Amino acid sequence: MKPFVLIVLLALPAPAALAIQSAPADVAEGSQAWLSEQRRINQRFVELFRERRYAEGEELGRTLLRRAEEHYGFDSTKLLAPLINLATVQRVQGRYSDALFHYERHIAIVERKLGYDALELVNPLHGVTRTYLRMGDYEAAIEPLARALRVTHANSGIYSLEQGPTRDLLSELALSEGDLEQANLHQRIQLRAHERRYGPGDLRIVPALYKLGEWYERTRQTGLQRQAYAAADRIIQASSGEHSLERVKALRGQASSFVRESRRDKAEEFFRRALNIVRTHPIQDILQQARLLIDIGDTLTIFNRQPRAQENYREAWKLLSADDEALDMRAELLQHPVIPLRSPRLPVQIPREMSDPSRYESQPRAGSVVLQMTIEADGTVSGAQVMESDPSGMIDEIVVALIKGAKFRPQMRDGEPVRAEDVIYRHRFRWYKRRDPEPAGDTPAPAEPVDEERPLEVPGAAGTDSRPSAA
């Protein structure tokens, strides 16, 4: 359940919300000064959170809550934002009991002041769910989600668009329990809600189709992924024409599905269709052209078509070098870090399956393996060795063996692919310690490792925790 950090940020109350609240006309001068300080502290808290400086953020969050209690009392709705911020930063640090305490306090204030079906309950109920998910207590996560859904339906109707975040968490919960069909249902319901609101062929449902396509891509349902992007493409063409720039994302989504199916020719065809649309548009977008050229280069690299792959990388380099504002993008995509293209499907949970969870500790522990390796100019790994691991030796051999079969986007220097030496690659995983001694021959490593994170075998896919960098 990887995308939690992004979800957390979306759940945070917007700092601007405090800035635009107007104080009563008779507010005391001291209260005006407090409002100004409150805005400043809250803004700093959000900055620390985004920088992942969680310990500092928690200290500031406690200060903000304490000061709010001094000004508004212990049962005011003015405490809601400080409570959910503090609970969130505690949750991401693994301080689950503290996080639950502050989420529950938030819920109790809303119930007393605003009612048992107030929309202000949804965010803390999501927070409680995420906390239980982090704890591995999936059964306890169900009820707060069910209540959040009831609250949303009571306020906005069965087909409300506002139910999306709750449905996303329900999908994650179902996925964690191995129920892919139920997880898919929660995603499709969101599309149905958009279709009910706007109509099945309306351009405004395209973002919902993209979201569904991204879900299918993440869960490796390649055929369904392509169907969702193709449906979006048809709507765009009918509304805006076949040369519309809005088609580019739909074409890229379909192309990535062909990559997953090892259909190189079809993947390259769809990427080039998108590139042709961008190139022939009256307003030239060199950044988008470069991204598509890199997509094509990545596809050819995956399928060992190195001379043609390097031609596309060189052309992308040339485009990005012609504009000073594009140099940062050139560095990110072509210089540093070296980017994985074909994921080695490293194990992210040890053991992979627990037939009897009672034999293991309920809280997962953090593990990692740090490799030093060389990436050749053709994107292959020519050498990899373990620099450090924790726990030592648990999955070292598996990680080394699998990483040797990975493909990487080659590092570029002066417009040419080059060999990258001393590349550091860190793989993070979670593991569950057994409560009783392990029987002889019972190894924690999975026989058939499966990557539960978002895969990186598709050009342009989102990142995971396993990110390489130059040493």
Image: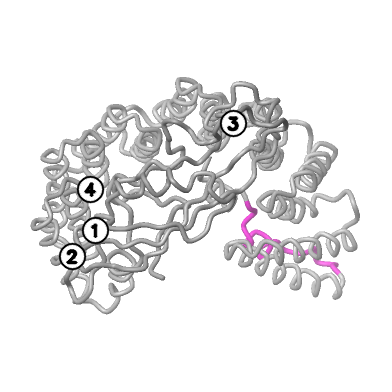
Tag 3 near tag 4, CB within 8 Å: no
Q: Nearer the viewer, residue 126 or 299?
A: 299
Q: Earlier in the sequence, mark 2 or mark 4?
A: 4
Q: Can you tell which mark lies on residue 248? A: 4
Residue visible at 28% across and 36% down in the picture: 229
Q: Amino acid at mark 4?
A: Val
Residue at the spot of label 3: 156
Residue behind mark 2? 316
In the picture, measured across the screen, residue 131 lies left or right of residue 10, that is right
* SS category of the residue bearing label 1: helix
The mark found on residue 291 in the picture is 1
Q: Is residue 333 visible?
A: yes
- Mark found first going from the N terminus, 1 or 4: 4
Secondary structure at badge 4 equals: helix
Q: Residues within 10 Å of mark 4 (few under 14, many from 20)?
A: many
Residue 321 point in image, percent of width and height: 21, 75
Mark 2 residue crowding within 10 angstroms, few (<14) / some (14–19) / many (20+): many
Give the number of the mark in front: 1 or 4. 1
Tell me which segment is drawn in magenta: 12-27
- Which quadrant is the C terminus positioned in? bottom left
Q: CA distance from mark 1 to mark 4?
A: 11 Å
Image marks 2 and 1: residues in contact by CB distance under 8 Å: yes
Q: Earlier in the sequence, mark 3 or mark 1?
A: 3
**Marks 3/1: CA distance?**
40 Å
